[in-house]
Amino acid sequence: MDGKLLGNPDRCYLGVYMHNSNSEFFYAGQSFLEGHYVSMSADPFYENVNNRLLVGIGEIKPDAYLGRQRYDTKYSGFDPLDEKQDIST
C-alpha cells in the first residue's frame, strides 16, 4: 500500500494477515504477490532463538531473465560459473 494513503509518503506498507483459526500461518495479499518475489529465511532464528526471521521482497521485472547468463548456452551474454562454484548442479 502506498504510504501516502496513511500519511507517510516515503514509506510502503505490506499487509500481512494472521489466519483466524491458526496463529502459525500468515498471509500476504494476492495483488502484492502477483507483482513481487518474496523469500523467507529462518537461518537467523536457528542460530539464536532471539533473532527474527528474514523476509526479502523484490519487484518482479518481466524483462529479467533469471539464470539466463549462467544456464542459457544460446544467450549472447552466457557466462557459466565454474563447476566448483555452481551449487545448483
Image (cartoon, rainbow, N blue to C red):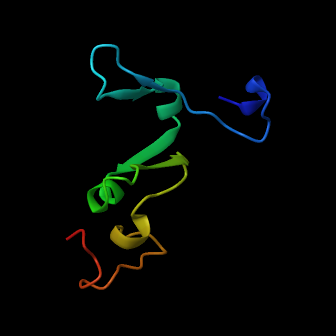
Residue displayed at 48% across by 74% down? 76
Quadrant into which the C terminus falls: bottom left
Q: Please, is residue 28 above or below residue 56 in the view?
A: above
Q: Check the image and report above or below for 73 versus 35.
A: below
- Quarter of the image containing the N terminus? top right
Q: Nearer the viewer, residue 85 or 67?
A: 85
Q: Residue at x 36, y 67 (%)?
A: 72
**Residue at horizontal 38%, vertical 69%?**
74
Quarter of the image holding residue 68? bottom left
Q: Is residue 38 above or below residue 68?
A: above
Which quadrant of the figure has residue 7? top right
Residue at image location 31% in from the left, 59% down from the top: 48
Please indicate, yes or no, whether residue 73 appears anywhere in the rendered image.
Answer: no
Q: Residue 26: x and y, percent?
A: 37, 28
Q: How many marks?
A: 0
Any part of residue 50 in sight: yes
Q: Residue 83's quadrant in the figure?
A: bottom left
Q: Nearer the viewer, residue 6 or 48?
A: 48
Image position, residue 16 (x, y; %): 48, 28
Q: Viewed as shown, does residue 18 lie left or right of 63?
A: left
Residue located farthest toward the top when viewing the structure as drawn: 20
Residue 60 horizontal/vertical position (percent): 52, 45
Q: Indicate the position of residue 75 as horizontal and vertical percent values.
A: 43, 69
Furthest residue in direction front, as rendered: 50
